[in-house]
């Protein structure tokens, strides 16, 4: 688990994961490194995995992880991204995807309230992705993804519950939906 802001509190709650029947190791950012920098910092903890799952900590997606892994393996790309269609993509960047699921591009936030496919913050990566990370602080979305499109980036659309708590209104909404989110997390 990559930690930074309030790392002590996160590690105190989750500890080594034993009570949750998982093993947790931490990679702690001493200074903010961005989504790419944090993952690159954790690279040594992932060296034995040919592929690995990454999830953003500020969003929730009800998904079938085995389906995403199967999708990733069947396409043999360097990365697979879970995407969702939202009615108003104004605060998100959108993902351009072919009918076969190949990602052809990313659009920055436009501020226009149009529907679109958005990155849901759940990924499967192959080890080779680390060859495309710059040193220091970086963003997966801005610094890494545009470089790897020709290596095979694929998107699998999901229809389960999705919430991104990146703005105060959605954080408040997540608190209100807490029980529903817990139930969704337990469903396949």
Image (cartoon, helix red, strand yellow):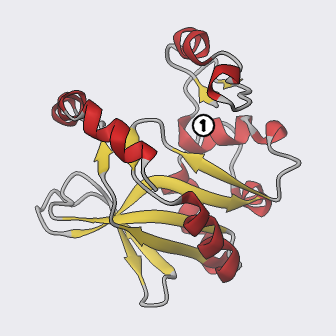
Disc 1 residue crowd, few under 14, some 14–19, many 20+, Cα 10 Å: some
**Please, is residue 89 above or below residue 171 in the view?**
below
**SS class, disc 1:** loop
**Please, is residue 97 above or below residue 66 in the view?**
below
Residue 135: give x, y in percent of width and height.
71, 42
Residue 162: give x, y in percent of width and height.
31, 51
**Please, is residue 149 above or below residue 130 in the view?**
below
Residue located farthest toward the bottom when viewing the structure as drawn: 99
Q: Judge left or right: residue 37 versus residue 120.
A: right
Q: Judge left or right: residue 138 versus residue 110.
A: right
Q: Judge left or right: residue 175 versus residue 42.
A: left
Q: Which residue is mark 1?
A: 137
Residue 180: give x, y in percent of width and height.
26, 39
Residue at the image position 18 percent from the left and 28 percent from the top: 172
- Labels in figure, total: 1
Q: Is 166 in front, or is 16?
A: 16
On-image quarter of the N terminus: top right
Residue located farthest toward the right when viewing the structure as drawn: 48
Residue at the image position 75 percent from the left and 54 percent from the top: 130
Q: Judge left or right: residue 179 versus residue 27.
A: left
Residue at the image position 50 percent from the left and 53 percent from the top: 122
**Please, is residue 172 above or below residue 84 in the view?**
above
């Amino acid at each position: 688990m990559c930690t930074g802001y309030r790392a002590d509190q996160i590690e105190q709650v989750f500890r080594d994961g034993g009570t949750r029947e998982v093993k947790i190791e931490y990679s702690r950012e001493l200074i903010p490194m961005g989504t790419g920098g944090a993952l690159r910092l954790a690279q040594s903890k992932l060296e034995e995995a040919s592929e690995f799952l990454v999830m953003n900590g500020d969003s929730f997606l009800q998904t079938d992880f085995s389906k995403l892994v199967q999708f990733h393996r069947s396409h043999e790309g360097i990365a697979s991204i879970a995407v969702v269609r939202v009615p108003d993509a104004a605060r998100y960047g959108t993902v351009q995807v072919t009918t076969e699921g190949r990602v052809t591009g990313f659009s920055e936030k436009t501020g226009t309230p149009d529907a679109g496919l958005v990155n849901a913050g759940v990924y499967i990566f192959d080890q080779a992705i680390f060859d495309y990370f710059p040193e220091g602080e970086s963003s997966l979305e801005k610094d890494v993804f545009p470089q790897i499109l020709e290596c095979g980036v694929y998107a699998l659309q999901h229809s389960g519950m999705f919430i991104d708590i990146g703005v105060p209104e959605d954080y408040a909404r997540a608190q209100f939906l807490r029980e529903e989110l817990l139930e969704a997390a337990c469903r396949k």
